[in-house]
Amino acid sequence: MKRSKKAQLELSYGMIFSVILIAVFLFVAIFAIMHFMNIGKLVETGVFIKDLQNEINRIWTSAGGEDIVFSKKINSETLQYICFFNQQKEAKGEFKDFSAELKRYSGSKTNNLHFYPASDSNFSPLEIKHIDIEKITKDSNPYCIKLKNKEIKLRLQKSLSDTLVTISAA
């Protein structure tokens, strides 16, 4: 029994359509997986910010002095620095070249925690309460701490005579 050319042509169109559908489904699946992975990174950073503020609040409300190292992983391919920036003061020090970009993406003037590079970052600047931004940025404004192996290590300090928490590189 011989098949006609028309039947062969219809079969090949059906095969082509099937391959196209499979390719579309694969593309949508990969896109969805990438999207959910990015959401996971944003959640991780949100947890970092929440944990940092909670630790600062704990130290700030403590009766005595404290000096601890706060360490967290931040799973971001583009994030290089976490910066504390006093926008009310003049930029100076090692990272003063960062200030123009940080100001551009800052939003509110009360935001004192910034992520650099701001243009590549998915993270918005925000205000961390109960920190002594004057003391933190005394010698370098912005004061930036480099991530090492996607991990940030901060020294949180408050002496008996301090009313606010200071932050430095650990």
Image (cartoon, rainbow, N blue to C red):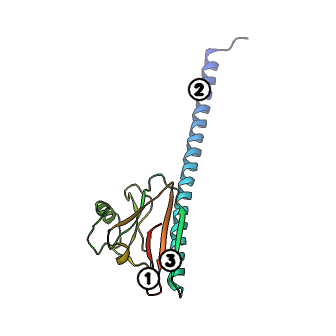
Tell me the kind of residue under disc 2: Tyr
Furthest-right residue in view? Answer: 1
Which of the 4 quarters of the picture holds residue 51?
bottom right
Q: Given the current orientation, which residue lies at the most extreme left position?
A: 90
Provide the residue designation for mark 1.
164
Q: Residue 65, how many percent across, how many down?
A: 51, 83
**Of labels 3 and 2, the one closer to you:** 3
What's the CA distance linking mark 2 and mark 1? 72 Å
Disc number for residue 56: 3
Position of 87 with respect to 24 (left or right) is: left
**Relative to 77, residue 56 above or below:** below
Q: Looking at the image, do the residues carrying marks 3 and 2 touch, with CB atoms under 8 Å apart?
A: no
Q: Which mark, by number, is residue 18?
A: none
Mark 2, residue position: 13
Residue depicted at 55% across the width and 41% down the height: 27
Looking at the picture, which amino acid does disc 3 mark?
Answer: Ile
Callout 3: SS = helix
Q: Work out whether mark 1 precedes mark 3 in sequence or the reverse, and give the earlier one.
A: 3
Q: Position of residue 86 (x, y in %)?
A: 33, 73
Label 2 vs 1, first from the N-terminus: 2
* Residues under numbered marks 1 and 3 in contact, where contact means CB atoms less than 8 Å apart: no
Q: Position of residue 164 (x, y in %)?
A: 43, 82
Classify the position of the N terminus by image quarter.
top right
Observer-nearest of 79 and 153? 153
